Each structure stands twice: as structure tokens, then as C-alpha cells.
Amino acid sequence: FYQYNPNAAVWGDIVWGHAVSRDLIHWLHLPLAMVANQWYDQNGVWTGSATILPDGNIIMLYTGSTNESVQVQNLAYPADANDPLLLEWTKYSGNPVLVPPPGIDIKDFRDPTTAWHTSEGKWRISIGSKVGKTGVALIYDTEDFINYQLKSEALHGVPGTGMWECVDFYPVSKKYQHGLDTSDNGPDVKHVVKASLDDDRHDYYAIGTYDELNSKWTPDNPDIDVDIGLRYDYGIFYASKTFYDHHKGRRVCGGWIGESDSELADVKKGWACLQAIPRTVSLDKKTGSNLLQWPVEEVENLRLRAREFKKVEVEPGSVVPLDLDAATQLDIVAEFELDKDALMKTAESTEEFSCKTSRGAAHRSALGPFGLLVLADDSLAEQTPVYFYINKGSNGTFKTFFCTDQSRSSAANDVNKQIYGNFVPVLEGEKFTLRILVDHSIIESFAQGGRTTITSRVYPTRAIYGSAKVFLFNNAIETNVTASLKIWQMNSAFIRPYPNIR
């Protein structure tokens, strides 16, 4: 289910689109699931979440924007619980089931989560909001999804973060790699709070401890609380939601990739925005403070022929072309090693580096940048570098950054060409590793097993189809880089329209 405007390639007239898949890669479009046809959702059928009940039935809570633009929560359920496609949905006759509580603005109350069980046998949900400029996740208990009790305190809040949208709350295992059901809890469990911040349109998360009795969550490290520390993705990725896949025992995250061209261009092409490749989410057992995000394994079924490049030496200031038949649909797995003597000899620096404010891949220093140029043409007039940058601090420690530079990604002049990225932990003994999914105008990049991810929406005009190339590059001044890669050509996913037989 997804937010959809059937009338234009811009925001407005929001209803629920609907699609189904057996593998999260190939999709069949279905008829619209819910449309704005009641007073309580007349101005939009907004974000919601499904909860699967113990008897197998499904309920849906969603935000409606009323005829007076008040944000309220509504209940819906399948018209036919035996329909495997869940084509028809019935809205509860007593909607809305929740209205903004005292102290909450009528336009700051949205996006209910999947419910989880409490030890008292009740269901608990969270709804995003704000109090002044403090973003909060409100908490409600219910036994029947019709009557609710607002808890006296929010699950969590962070001053200065503004409105929290699309709040997500879920457990991750401290011991195992597999995912957990949303209701799981215990001594070997940590909990994640994620909020999509309306003020800056990014998804932030933090890992902490959930006190069920007091309905409170506390971050393990206040210095990396929601909005202060970590993001799901340092590119263009927003309004994500996770769900527990009980068939494969994993938690899967889906996110929205917006556009970074002009609205006029979107209207001209007749569509805007897309869904990212679904990702598994788990706790990084090595750092304990990061999530690991990784493309679902099913995407590997799109792999076709592969080329391997072993221990390619890339000298300082050089660019090395990689011989590929085509380079617009790729799955790239790469690892890089630096000259250890160079690492030791490199002078310490007081440089304060930032991907966003640097000069991108052209910003040369002793130990970087180095990585790959994707969606590049032969002349390198168009290119999107995905790279590492290492800074040796004044205390002799190394800090690694992972970046994507869009500044030369397109010859078009109506495109946002930011440089994305952030710090990525690289632990002792680890090589520099990345995976990149390239799909014509989308680049999804995962560093160090998914500790840091970057999604880019680019609009090449020259590096398209047979003219797109891939290059290794090393803009470090003082070190060689040794790269080993395996690159697969990728088949297309099949996205089918619903047959018009009804």
C-alpha cells in the first residue's frame, strides 16, 4: 500500500495505491485500496499501518484529513478476509476512532504504527506529533482498536526536531541476525525508534531500551538520539516503514525515493517518485549502535552475467575504466585496500571534513577520495562518484566517510546536484566494502555491510543506455588503492498492470 495521487504527478488528492508481490521485486498493480470518499478522509487518505491479529485477521489504522483538514485516525478492515489479494476494504462505520488530544494541533497528529502486544494483553500503537518544536511519539493502548487510552507520557520526544511523521518502533535482536516480531521483547532485545522529520525530510533512528511498564523508550546514547545522530539513508529516502516477514524471519524496510528535478519536469513526464529496493534491517552486533540495511536477497534473482576484477591497482590521481557490456542496470560488490605503509606515514590533520560541504570527489587529500564512478560517459562529463574519504585526525585515529557526489551527475540544469554522505564506522581489520545497485537514474549504495547507506536520484543525459560506463578512481595523493569487484548485469523487474476484467 502506498500514497498515490491518481490525478497528477504532484502532491494532492492522496489515496491508497495497492500492489502485490511474491518476492518484493516483481509486482502486480491492483485497483486503488482506499479513496477519499468520507468526511473524515475527504482531504486525503494518508499514511497508516496494518496489524495482523492472532486469529489471522488484519486491521488497518490510517490517518485521514477531514473536510476541515483535521488529522484523525481511522479503522479499516478487509471486506473479504479470505481474498488473498485484499482487493476491497471496508471503513469502520464509527470512524474516526481517534482525534487530536488536548494540546496537540489539529494538523500535527498522523501516521499510526503497527500495533504491538503488551504483557497485559492489550495492543499498543504510536502516532507521530509535536508539542511546540519538540517532536514526539504519542502512545495509545487499546483492546479492540475502537476504544483507546492515551498514555500520560510520550514514548519518546526530542526538543527542536519538529513534527515526527511515519514513526516506526520495533525490536532488534542483540544475539541473532534474524528479525523479530513487532511484539517481541526481553533481555536480548533492543528497540529502534525511527522518525521521518517533516522539517528536513529525512529518516532518523536511534537504538535504545523500551520500558513497557512505563511506556517509555530511552536511547542507549543520548548523543545519537533521533535527529541528533544516525539516519537510515543519507540521500533521498523518506517516509519509510518496516514490517516483520514471518515467513523468512526478517524485518524489511520500504522507503520512498522522491524526485530531485523540477516539478515542471515531473508534470511533463507524467509521474514522480518511486519505491526503493526493500531492505532487511538488523542490529550491527559489532558496533552495537548501528543498524545494518541490506537489499533483500530476492534482488539477486535479477542477476545475469557477471564480470570479476581482482586486485586492480589504482594509482594516486588515476581513473581506470572497467570493461562491461552495459552499465545502466548493475549490482556491484567491491572491496578496497589501502597501502598500509602510506596509512602510517600520512601526517595527522586537523581538517573538519563533511561530504556535503566538501568539493566532492574532486577534493583531494592524502587518503582519499577513492571508489567508483557510475553512470559515467566516456568523457566523464557526466559521472556520479560513490566513494570513501579517510581523514587521519590529530590523535592518529582514522575516520572514514562514505559519500555520493551528484555535482556532475547530469548536464541538465533543473536538477538538484547535492553531495550526500556521512561518517561510516570501519573497524580494525575490516576492508573498505560497498555494494551499489544502479538502475538508469537511481543509485542505491551500501557501505560496510549496510552501516551507512545513500540513495541518489540522478538524471543523466549522456551516460545512458550503451553510453553509460563504470570507472574506478583514486584521488588520494599519498596512497595506492587495490580494488576487487564483482559486477552483475541486472534483468528488469516485472511491474504488471492489473487486468481490467472486473
Image: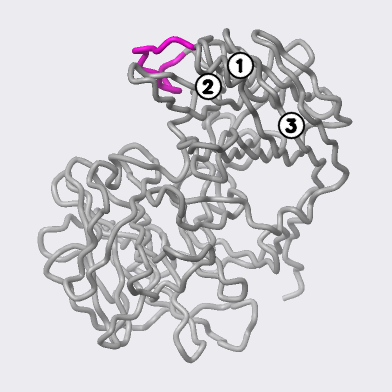
From the image, which quarter does the C terminus lie in?
bottom right
Of residues 82 and 338, the one drawn nearer to the viewer in this rendering: 338
Q: Which residue is mark 1?
A: 408
> Residue 354 in magenta?
yes
Q: Picture quarter containing residue 192?
A: bottom left
Q: Mark 2 to mark 3: distance in Å?
A: 29 Å
What is the crowding at mark 1: few (fewer than 14 residues within 10 Å), some, or many (at least 20)?
Answer: some
Q: Amino acid at mark 2?
A: Lys
Going from N to C along the chain, the mark reached first, 1 or 2, is: 1
User: Any mark on residue 417, and which?
Assistant: 2
Q: Amino acid at mark 1?
A: Arg
Range of magenta residues: 346-358
Q: Where does residue 341 sit, x and y in percent of width and height? A: 57, 16
Q: Which quadrant is home to the N terminus?
A: bottom right
Res 72 label: none
Crowd rating for badge 3 (residues with CA inside 10 Å; few <14, some 14–19, many 20+):
some
Magenta residues: mostly which secondary structure?
loop
Dot placed on the residue nearer the N-terminal end, 2 or 3: 2
Question: Which amino acid, by three-letter code, is at mark 3?
Answer: Ser
Query: Residue 137, relative to residue 483: is it above or below?
Result: below
The residue closer to the viewer here, 339 or 202, is 339
Q: Which residue is mark 3?
A: 484
Q: Residue 29: percent from the left, percent from the top?
A: 67, 63
Is residue 369 visible in the rendered image? The answer is yes
Rounded to the nearest angstrom, the CA distance separating label 1 from label 2 is 7 Å
